[in-house]
Amino acid sequence: MIYQALFLVLKRLDPEFTHEWGMRVIALAGMWPVRSVLRKRTAPAPSQRVHALGLTFGSPVGLAAGFDKNAVAIRGMYALGFDHVEVGTVTALPQNGNPKPRLFRLPDDQALINRMGFNNDGAQVVAARLRALRAQGGELPIIGVNIGKSRVTAISDATADYVASAALLAPLADYLVVNVSSPNTPGLRGLQQEKELTPLLKAVKAAAEGTPVLVKIAPDLDAKAIASVCKLVMKLNLAGIVATNTTISREGLSAAPQDVARLGEGGLSGAPLRERSVEVLDMVRQILPREVCVVSVGGVFDGQDVAERLDAGATLVQAYTGFVYRGPLFAAKVTKELQAATA
């Protein structure tokens, strides 16, 4: 109730400003002894542990990439109940991203539109931050690092760009995710085609030197393209797939079309993506065997959503927009709802 009242105020402010303010608060939540007190309240039941990627996750519920782009609030996210945090997207070169405004709320649809454009501090800075974090010791969530192409790098040089990030970040990550599916970097989604994706994933896997590598796909791929990526994952013996990124579709929104059009381009996330995310999960799991990790993302708002994804074959489940709308104790609420749903 407190967060709902606060959100009535926050939603009147610029969404990106609100996000930056929230990140500072979450980072403070990760400071001792606050994090210790919070974690006792938010930790999931031991029965929710998941073994995947050669790791033990405290629960299947994690934070999707895009929220903590620069690895500045990992301990705070853990204190709030997230047992894995995927940071990034991180690019080899630091970049400011697209011009503002670039993040928009659609509250009636429980959705967001973003065209952030991989704004981040760059692989070297994020690697130094992760190194310092691990050197401090103490409990941490499983840390995934999502890597993407630097905007100034030509598509023809994309592999070298991804490899540069992988070499810096893989030694500090529990797993890597190759993001070739954001709609906000020109030409990026073309890398999902098998001809371009094969050498890219081969090179990243080699650079990762044993750190599990997954690839993140778009919900807008057709069944044939999804099957192609799945078969490539098996051929290259990659760790798995993250399904899905944001969508360029605007179908099914209750917001007025002219209002949506006024917001411009960008990836749509949140409740409108739920149905398509489950469809893609079903298609992916029909091809990939159970030992291959599948992370389901898109339209996850409560424990029932998580239970549905797990029943459909997801190994892990991530959220972003649900966290924005339900508030800071989102992960703790969801794991409790999941426990009730599966009791």
Image (cartoon, rainbow, N blue to C red):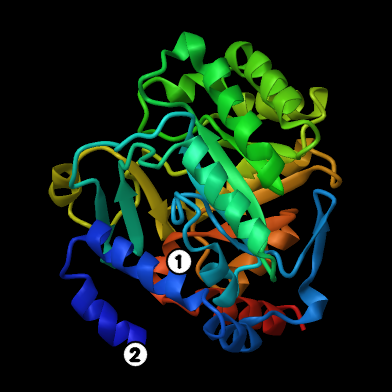
The residue depicted at 18 percent of the width and 61 percent of the height is: 14
Mark nearer the viewer, 2 or 1: 2
Indicate left or right for 175 with 129 as reference.
Answer: right
Q: Nearer the viewer, residue 216 or 166?
A: 166
The percent position of residue 50, horizontal first and vertical second, equals: 80, 63
The residue depicted at 56 percent of the width and 16 percent of the height is: 160
Which residue, given by chain and number where applicable, does mark 1 sit on?
A: 322
Which labelled disc corresponds to residue 229?
none
Crowding around mark 2 (Cα neighbors within 10 Å: few <14, some 14 to 19, many 20+) is few
Which residue, given by chain and number where applicable, does mark 2 sit on?
A: 2
Quadrant for residue 23, please give it: bottom left
Look at label 1 and name its amino acid.
Answer: Gly
Whether residue 5 can be seen here = yes
Look at label 2 and name its amino acid.
Answer: Ile
Indicate left or right for 267 with 64 as reference.
Answer: left
Whether residue 278 can be seen here = no
The percent position of residue 302, horizontal first and vertical second, equals: 54, 73
Considering the image in quadrants, where does the N terminus appear? Answer: bottom left
Quadrant for residue 11, please give it: bottom left
The residue depicted at 53 percent of the width and 85 percent of the height is: 34
Considering the image in quadrants, where does the C terminus appear? Answer: bottom right
Crowding around mark 1 (Cα neighbors within 10 Å: few <14, some 14 to 19, many 20+) is many
Q: Alpha carbon of mark 2 to alpha carbon of mark 1: how far?
A: 17 Å
- Helix, strand, or loop for circle 1? helix
The percent position of residue 36, horizontal first and vertical second, equals: 61, 84
